Image: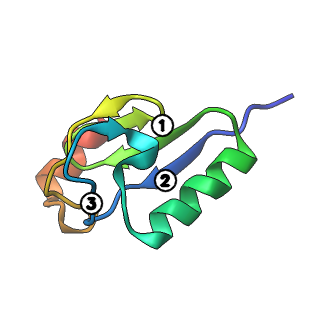
Amino acid sequence: MPKTIVFVSCGKTKAPEARTARFLGTFPQFSYASSCADQISSQWFVLSKKYGVVHSEEIIASYEKILIKIHETEKKSLRS
């Protein structure tokens, strides 16, 4: 049976301290997406502008970048 991989995009509003990626985003849409991801798959990932693809249980520090404002050169580096 194929595995389902879920990605949730991290947004602008984040907790001020380091947390697991699943709890770093503090805005309602992120919380909702994380909850949906939990229902779809036991293994899911957060798309982070600073850290790239991060497992939902990995602890990461807060930061001020958001994916929407990525420059084209940064997009290329995330793809490789």
Q: CA distance from mark 2 to mark 3?
A: 11 Å
The residue type indicated by label 1 comes to Ser
In this rendering, is residue 51 above or below 24? Answer: above
Q: Position of residue 19 (x, y in %)?
A: 33, 38
x 55%, y 54%: residue: 34
Q: Is residue 28 positioned above or below 59 on the image?
A: below
Q: Residue 50: x and y, percent?
A: 19, 44
The way the protein has been coloured in the rendering is rainbow
Q: Which residue is mark 3?
A: 67
Label 1, on which residue?
A: 56
Q: Which residue is mark 2?
A: 8
> What amino acid type is highlighted by mark number 2?
Val
Identified at 52% across, 48% down, the residue is 7
Which of the 4 quarters of the picture holds residue 12?
bottom left
Task: Compare marks 2 and 3 and give the one earlier in the sequence.
Answer: 2
SS category of the residue bearing label 1: loop
- Side (left or right) of 53 relative to 32: left
Residue type of the residue flagged with mark 3: Leu
Q: Is residue 78 above or below residue 80?
A: below
Q: Are marks 1 and 2 in contact (CB under 8 Å)?
A: yes
- Label 2 close to label 3 by CB (< 8 Å): no
Is residue 35 depicted above or below 42 in this figure? Answer: below
> What is the spatial separation of the Cα atoms under label 1 and label 2, in whole angstroms?
9 Å
Residue placed most toward the observer, 51 or 28: 28
Tell me the quadrant of the picture where the C terminus can be found.
Answer: top left
Left or right: 26 in relation to 76: right
Quadrant occupied by the N terminus: top right
Marks 3 and 1 in Cβ contact (< 8 Å): no
